[in-house]
Amino acid sequence: MCGIVAYVGAEKAGPILFDTLKRLEYRGYDSAGIAMRSNGDLLVLKSAGRISELEKAYLTQGSPGDCMGIGHTRWATHGRPSDDNAHPHTSGDIAIVHNGIIENYLELRERLFDLGYRFSSETDSEVLAHLINHHFRGDLAEAVSEAISEVEGSYALAVLSSRSSAVVCARKDSPLVIGVGLGCNYVASDVPALLPYTREVVRLRDGELAIIHRGQLEIKDLSGRPVAYLMEHIDWDVDAAEKGGYSHFMLKEIHEQPRALQETMAGRISEIGGDVMIDLGFSDDEVRKIQRVCIVACGTSYHAGLLARYLFLRAAGLPVDVEVASEFQHQQMRPETLLVAISQSGETADTLQALKKASPCGIRCIAITNVVGSTVTNLVDGTIYTRCGPEIGVAATKTFTSQLAALILLGIRLGRARGHISPDKARKMLVEFSRLPGFVQEVLDEREKIREIAEQYAGSSTYFFIGRDYLYPIALEGALKMKEIAYIPAEGYAGGELKHGPLALITDGTPVVALATCGKKIQSNIKEVRARGAELIAIVERGDPNIGKVASTVIELPPAMPILSAVLCTVTLQLLSYYTALKLGREIDKPRNLAKSVTVE
Ligand code: AGP
């Protein structure tokens, strides 16, 4: 996730670009850049690091530039944070800033290279600059339209040229808002950045081009026909706007999950070939020699690892050990073991330490992380990025479901390379998998019902979560969330394990959340707790005829494959803990005693 801005008006563009970019810093902040018209030429300033550093360099140079420009704050997905990878990217006298992922960039890059274009970054975005330049015959909007018709993926795009008096913008599946001022116009990835300047905004829609002049705004479709647009007046305050209108970052991030899952999958699935395209950093011959997988991780990431224990055995025939990183003891691992480190931040000291302990064994290692260039990526052969944008809330939400998606991709990738699953079976799984973002949206649409349930039980002194198979790690994760943000003591158990001790704690009115979307065996565990007076909150597949009869409350989810149902149950439990914490007045985004990234052992 990145932030893009633009300005066309009567004032010097630089200070406005920096100010609006700083308001988008929550979208990512590993590099920044601006491009402006300057005495008939283009002037580009960009570098790795924070926007404020770049602004200092701009001021030192005497605040150059005219009254028209574009800007970018980056959160790396393709290529590490560096000066070269920072946006804007240029081609001739064209500069672009891009937020999104160009899925067919390798193919486009090769073609443009053959046409004589040379690349100075590792990004997918740079192809856009060359492609637009390639199509530019005097009309910038036409060139942008032709270029994006060749692009697969998602984009919010702002384009500047020293030969055009307008900035041209386009979008597909990435947000872009135009702020309409008096004799000037603004662009930003999100409304908050614009509020100090104007409250009149136009939200660009997929398939539209905005041609932004100093005192005029034209919106066209991709074939150049004018499109009517709706001007919206914003009456939120700036603080609420930074969270996109949500009351907390956690709630915003919960709602970002359909998009985050799409980003994790983007360009990695071949439904036709029945395969997953992920470079593991070593050959498929080596993949075939792997006999065991060891996963190290902490907290929520550890729960993602537990789910992979079931998945990798089924999809790839590989037994898996999952270790809490701080307790990792496998210093004598056999060479045919694959070590997978899962860490959203990529900086968790316990996980890094476990990787270091394992390195003398000479085994292959993979990291699954959300942060490009984080320390974990330097300790492994290959990295699978979850690409879900920065997560500000301390409680992991979208990073967890994206880890699950990355593990599903990895499981199928390993299974296909080892011949454990057929292309046909993989194809069926992938087709179903690509429907996951839509299923997650259906769960989010049920939030009011989940809120009512959360409020009903918010006064409870304890909570239990039970699940079996894929849903057991999700029960653990549900309990962790409830402890972490609502501060209610909560236990997650494998359904079959309750009767071996914890059942003694179930008394009249104890809320027990049963994850019952798949498998019949959980029903006997449900009866066990009901017989002890528990208040049963059952999460079931839509249309389940049985559980409604025994449960106090039922939450219905869309029918889906068991592994996908695990993701849907996760989202339900995130909302349950969020609304419980809200009712109890907790400090949700910054729970007491915790930190987003734990860099001490
Ligand atoms: C979960 O909500 C927590 N933020 C915590 O358990 C977290 O998952 C753990 O500290 C590991 O962090 P990592 O994924 O960045 O390594």
Image (cartoon, rainbow, N blue to C red):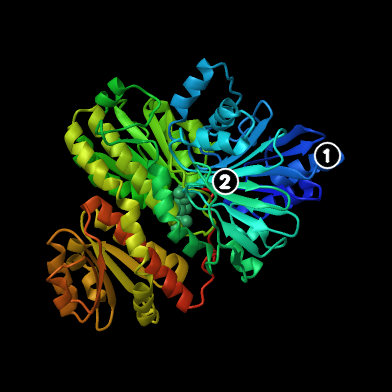
Secondary element at tag 2: loop
Q: Which of 108 and 430 is in front in this view?
A: 108
Secondary element at tag 1: loop
Q: Where is residue 162 in the image (x, y as percent from the top left)?
A: 72, 33
The residue positioned 80% from the left and 42% from the top of the image is: 66
Q: Position of residue 227 (x, y in %)?
A: 53, 53
Residue that protrudes farthest toward the bottom in the picture? 508
Per the image, the residue denoted by label 1 is 64
Answer above or below: position of 187 versus 582.
above
Quarter of the image for residue 343 reads: top left
The residue positioned 19% from the left and 65% from the top of the image is: 500
Q: Residue 479 carries which label?
A: none
Can see residue 476? no
Q: Position of residue 534 (x, y in %)?
A: 23, 79
Number of labelled discs?
A: 2
Cα–Cα gap, marks 1 and 2: 25 Å
Q: Which of 197 and 205 is in front in this view?
A: 205
Answer above or below: position of 339 versus 281.
below
Can see residue 275? yes
Answer above or below: position of 537 versus 32.
below
Per the image, the residue denoted by label 2 is 2
The nearer-to-camera label among 1 and 2 is: 1
Quarter of the image for residue 177 reads: bottom right
Q: Is residue 165 left or right of residue 464?
A: right
Q: In this view, does 162 lie to the left or right of 234?
A: right
Task: Inspect the image, locate mark 2, and give the three-letter code of the amino acid beneath it.
Answer: Cys
The residue positioned 46% from the left and 78% from the top of the image is: 583
Task: Inspect the image, locate mark 1, and give the three-letter code of the amino acid beneath it.
Answer: Pro
Q: Where is residue 98 in the image (x, y as percent from the top left)?
A: 57, 40
Q: Which of 99 and 128 is in front in this view?
A: 128
